[in-house]
Image (cartoon, helix red, strand yellow):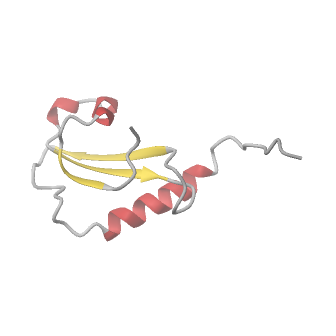
């Protein structure tokens, strides 16, 4: 299932951690869905990971991370293939 909302907190065996070089070292993560625009479905995921259990917490303010995900999604969406509408 796709991650629909930003997640910040302890690692709980998220599948995306397998993308990392040392997933076993991860103690906390921030997972940011990447979208071309705010309400679009995600096309990717930005994974920030730390070996510090306290680095990413569910109680932390996530405004900066949310904006980072929005900017990264908008910028990277330009690299997605163009989809043409086949309707007349």
Which residue is at the far right? 88
Taking 14 as reference, is 7 above or below it?
A: below
Q: Is residue 15 left or right of residue 85?
A: left
Q: Is residue 14 left or right of residue 85?
A: left
Taking 28 as reference, is 25 above or below it?
A: above
Tell me residue 86's x, y (percent).
82, 41
Tell me residue 31's x, y (percent).
32, 49
Front position in the image: 13 or 18: 13
The image quadrant that residue 75 belongs to is bottom right
Tell me residue 79's x, y (percent).
63, 45
Which residue is at the far front? 88
Front position in the image: 34 or 21: 34
Which residue is at the far left? 53
Q: Is residue 37 left or right of residue 31?
A: right
The residue that appears at 33% across and 70% down in the rendered structure is: 63
The residue that appears at 68% across and 40% down in the rendered structure is: 81
Tell me residue 7's x, y (percent).
28, 53
Location of the N terminus by quadrant is top left
The residue that appears at 30% across and 32% down in the rendered structure is: 15
| Badge count | 0
The residue that appears at 14% across and 42% down in the rendered structure is: 27
Front position in the image: 11 or 75: 11
The image quadrant that residue 6 belongs to is bottom left
Q: Is residue 48 left or right of residue 12?
A: right
């Amino acid at each position: 299932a796709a991650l629909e909302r930003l997640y910040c907190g302890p690692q709980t065996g998220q599948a995306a951690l397998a993308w990392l070089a040392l997933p076993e070292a991860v103690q906390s993560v921030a997972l940011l869905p990447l979208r071309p625009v705010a309400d679009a479905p995600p096309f990717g995921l930005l994974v920030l990971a730390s070996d510090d259990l306290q680095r990413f917490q569910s109680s932390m303010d996530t405004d900066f991370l949310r904006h980072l995900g929005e900017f990264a999604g908008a910028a990277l969406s330009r690299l997605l293939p163009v989809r043409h509408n086949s309707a007349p």
